[in-house]
Every structure is written in structure tokens, then in C-alpha cells.
Amino acid sequence: MQNKKQFNGTFWWGVLLIFIVSAIAYLPLANQIGYINDDWYLMYDMQVKDVNFFHVIFSGDRPGRALGMIPLFSVFGFEPFYYHLSAYLFRFLGGVSLYWAFQMLWDKKRFAPLAAALLFTVYPGFLSQTNAIDYQSHILGLFLATLSIALTIKSVLSVERAPRMWWMAGSILAGWGYLSQMEYFIGVEAFRFASIFVLMWREQGESIWQKLKKIIIVSLPFLLIAGGFLVWRMFIFTAERKATDIGLQLSQVFSSPLTLLWWLNYLIQDTLSVTLVAWGLPMYVLAFPMRLKDIMSAFGWAGFAALWTVLGIRQLGKNNSEAEPDSGRGQEALWLSLIGIAGGLIPVILVNRHVTLPDYSRYTLISSIGAALLLATVIEHFSSRAVRSAVLSFFVAVAVLTHYGNAARAVNETQATRNFWWQVAWRTPQIEPGVTLIASYPGSPLSEDYFVWGPANLIFYPEKQAGNPVEIKLPASVLTDDAVLNIVTNGGVETPLRRGNYLERDFGNVLVMIQSRSNGCVRLINGDVPELSPNDQHRLLLIAPYSRLENVATEGEFKTPPAVVFGAEPAHGWCYYYQKADLARQRGEWEKIPALLKQALNEGQYPEDSLEWMPFLQASAVLNDVDKVRSTIKLVTADKFLRLQVCAVMTDFEQKETLSDEVKALIEHGICK
């Protein structure tokens, strides 16, 4: 048996291990990750309003989120790296809180509590850590949930009345705190009451009824957490989003009894996902497709984390010379883990959501408590301490590989998005308000319209707005089947109002912007003569003729994208000269284009997409540089698709511009035949 001093030394060594390993998992690339997904609309709203607008944003479903975001934004502002640091800090504190809880539950064990807390902290099934601004509330809520559990256990174990009441009050407040951030985290209450049951059931010399009575009495105060929240949520607060309307979602089971069978199916499926799939699929999808350089870095960080884990477990063994008695505690951990998994999943399933990796990984957060405890319990049953250490280190390495791959994906997405909008800023002095933007990012499917209108408005319409809601001057649309149909049929105007943002989306007035490949240039499409690449999505081919380039103003001062959002201005490579040439083409300043090409070529810059020669081909044609026209034609007719595109564009061009007969002959015989 360890004395108190030995126990404290072991505990704080475990805290240090969690801190180091989780930092290795989450921080190596954090300073390179910018705004991701929902971060865009949140930060645009902060640009045009003030910090109190968070109350408006979250008023329709989770008003408590504003209480977390207001102080964070007040301190961090628009700098994304700080949010990654705070997200990591909350993740670490959540792991420490759970470690504390497990140590109190099994005070004679050392390996399993630390292993479970460590696996929970770096759990690879949650992949939205990179979306640090929007998911700050999730991670903060998870920390408050685990803290509330630890305070509950501390309260139950306290002998003196006054400290017990203080621990209880802290637990209830932290409980309301986590529910104010994410209502579907309520499943952690199952783990709370299961922990109370475990502690009370151990009492010796009492009958079953005496134990049950004591369990009920001890549990009653903690019913205030879920009970108080549910009363407020169901009878006082009115949710605007159907997905967070508890009563509406539960009513479905009465309208369709088969819903219960579907829920059971999802429970089985999601249990397998959080316990087994989470440790393999995300790593396979995210880590292995990386570039060789990144894979080597990932393995280096994973090995470093594994080494620290081995050293930590060895230190744990030094501080704990006695064998760890089981006394049936392994069965307790098993049942607690299963209850934790089911409790975390059932509220998600009841609102008709379920775990889908890697896209909907946020639904694993609460169930990851049970999943980590289950895995640690299995590992603990290996008889050899060396084997336990090796197996735990393996799973830690898997988690670090996964998180590195996930972060690398976020870095690539950040760089691609920044590159896209820097090119637009080089090309476009201004975009007229009211046009609906259709953008195609390279290799990054867009699931929400604000992935486009967020950065666009931050650049072109960053001015403060006085009224509510926020008016989005440049709306956007995701290119769904319905959107394609609306565009090709001039389907009118949509006026969505969401989270305090109002859009007038006019499908009869669109501007299409395409970047097919990450090393290619952004093309602003002229619907009269669209220039399309064989690499473009087929949906873009359908709507390109409806793109209205006249919405791009050719005069005025160029906007400089804010560096805190879009990074420092990139080096002026080929796409810089292409964008300037394309703008000169729109202005009709043909004589400027050859000088831009000469400067680019002198710097060793060349296009990756043959279609990007078009402004230079047309300038040569207008300026009657026959030799340049002849040589450029060979470059832009590399395949049949491009030849057809260039033929259509140049045929239209020769009807609008005055070209020499020799140039016309080159177009007819060198391109169109």
C-alpha cells in the first residue's frame, strides 16, 4: 500500500505524462492551421459586429455557447493559433479530470486509471480538434463533464459534511456548464450514476436494500443536473433547430415503431465504431495517404509519444512496488465502460444522428470515456508489465499518427483556401454585392455555403454593420443537384436566415470560380465563353454558361486579405501573373499582357494547366504576333477536350475582336480542324 506522499507523486507524474503525450498529439502543426468549416461564419460575424453578437448566433439552439466564446474571443481575437492552444488545454484538463475520477474510483490501481485517461485524452475517434474555433464549445463541454464526474466522486467519498457539500455544489455547477455547451452530452449522466452505484455497492455488512436505499439518497442531489436542464430545455426554452428539439425528436418513436429497431441497429453499429473502428479507420484514411515527408514526421512524433509512454509506465512501476489487487474491480471497470459507451451514444441516436467516421466524429466524444476505459481494462489484464506498457504505447502511437494526419489535412485545406482567395484578391478589385458565388476548391468538397461567403466577405465587405441580422453582401451556394437545377432554370431567389446571418441567394445572378487543382490557378468564368478544363467537376460544366463575369468590377483599389486570416501574401508565382493577365483581358488592355508573360517566364514560372495560356493566346492574336499565336496554339490544344474548348472560345473571340487574316487562319486550321 502506498502512503499519501507516494500516491501524490504517482498522480502528478501521470498528469505530466498526459500533458506531454497530448501535446505531441495535438500541437506539432497547430500554428499552421487556419479557419476551418464553421469558423468562417463565426469570425466574419465578429468582423462586422461585436463580441456580444455571439448571443444572437447561438440563441436558437445552444445559448450557453456564447458564455464560453465571448471571453475567448475577447482575449484571442481573430488569431486561430490561440484557439488551438485553448482547445488543447481543455482537452488536457478533461483528461486530467478523468484521471482524477478513475484514481478515486480505484485507489489501489495505478496502471488502468492512467492508461484510460491517457487513451481518452488522445482518443483518435474525435477528429474535429483542428476545427478549434467552432469546436471550442465541444471541447470545453467535455472538460466540464469530466470535471463534474470527478467532483461527484469526490463528494461521495468525502466524510465531512462541509467539504462534501462544496464538492457537490461544484459538481452540479460544472454539470450545468457542460450541458449549456452541448445538450447531447447528457449521456455522461449514465456514467455519473453508475460510478455512484459502484462506490455504494462496495459497502460491507449491508443488505441489498440498504445499499439501494443509500444509492438513491446519494444520487438525488445530482439529479438536479440533468433534471434542471431538461425542465429548462423542454418547457422554457424554444429551440429553433429541429435537430436540437428534444421533444420533436422523441415524438418520432410514437409515429413509427420501426424507429426503435433503427435505434438499436445504430447503437450496435456505433458501439463498434467507437471501440474498434476509431483505432483503425481514421489512421488509414488520414495518415497513410500523406506525402512521404509527412509520414516520416508522423512516425517520428508517434515514436516520441510511445517512448514517453513507456518511460511513464516504468516510473509508475517504480512508485508502485506492490502488485495491484483486483478484488473484483476489473468487473466494475468493464460494466462502467459499457455503460459509458451506451450512455454517450443513446442521446445522439435518439435525435437521429449517429457516428460516421471520419466525418461525424464529434458524436464519439462522450462515449470515448467508456471506450478508453474498456481498452485500458483489456490491456490491464496482460500479466506482464512490459507487455502492458508495449500495448498501451502502440495505441498511443496509433492515436498520434491519426491526429498528425488529421492536422496535416487541415494544414493542406488551410493553404488551399488561402491560396484560392489570394488569387481572387489579385484578380478582382471588387465583386458587386448581390451576386451569388459558386466556388470549387481543389480537392475539398464544400458542405456549407459559408465556406465560400465567409472568406469572400471578409475580403470584399469587412465593414461594420449596425443592424441585425448580419446582411451577407456576397452570398454563396453549395453546388447541390437542386442548386444546379435552380441555376439552369433561373430558379429565383432564396432568403435563408441562419444564426443571425441573412442571405438573398439569386440563382439568376451567379459568379462561378473554379480551381481544379491545388497547383493550378483560379478561373473566374465568363458565361458567354466559358473556359473549362477536363479536370473540372461535371456539375460545373452545366452551370458555367450562367456565370456573369460582369459582376467583377475592373476598377478601384485592390483589397488586401487580412494576414491573420489568410496568412502573408504568397510569392508571386505563375498564378499571380495569370490573374493580372486575366484582369487585363477583361479590361481590354491587351498590350499589358505580353509584358506579364515575359516577366513570368523570366522568373521560370509556367502553368500547370494548359488552359491558363488563354489570356496570352488572345493577346497575341489581337496584337498580331503570329509566331506567338502559332506556338501557343500547340500548348492549349494538348487533348481533344481542350481543343474543343479553345476552338469555341477563339471562334467567338474573332467575331468580337479585329484579327488579321493570318491569325484567323491559324485559329481555323490550327485549332478547329
Image (cartoon, helix red, strand yellow):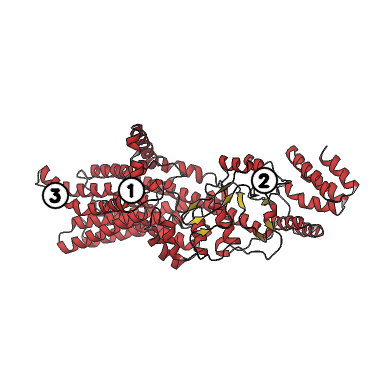
Q: In this view, does 96 lie to the left or right of 441?
A: left
Task: Please tell me in which quadrant of the rendered image residue 341 appears.
Answer: top left
Would you call the spot at circle 1 few (<14 residues within 10 Å), some (14-19), or many (20 or more)? many
Q: Residue 181 carries which label?
A: none
Q: Viewer-nearest of labels 3 and 1?
A: 3
Query: From what the image shows, is residue 250 above or below residue 43?
Result: above
Residue picked out by circle 1: 369
Which numbered dot is residue 214? 3
Q: Is residue 543 left or right of residue 665?
A: left
Give the mark toward the camera: 3 or 2. 2
Q: Verify CB contact (< 8 Å) between mark 2 and mark 1.
A: no
The quarter holding residue 537 reads top right
| Residue 253: percent from left, percent from top | 33, 36
Which is more N-terminal, label 1 or label 2?
1
Q: Of helix, strand and loop, which one carries label 2?
A: helix
* Quadrant of the snapshot with the C terminus: top right
Amino acid bearing label 2 = Tyr
Q: Nearer the viewer, residue 283 or 302?
A: 283
Spatial CA distance of label 3 from label 2 is 72 Å
Q: Which of marks 3 and 2 is nearer the N terminus?
A: 3
612 or 472, nearer to the observer: 472
Which residue is at the front of the view, 614 or 389?
614
Q: Name the residue under label 2.
A: 546
Q: Residues within 10 Å of mark 2 (few under 14, many from 20)?
A: many
Cα gap from disc 2 to disc 1, whole angstroms: 51 Å
- Say what secondary structure mark 3 lies in: helix
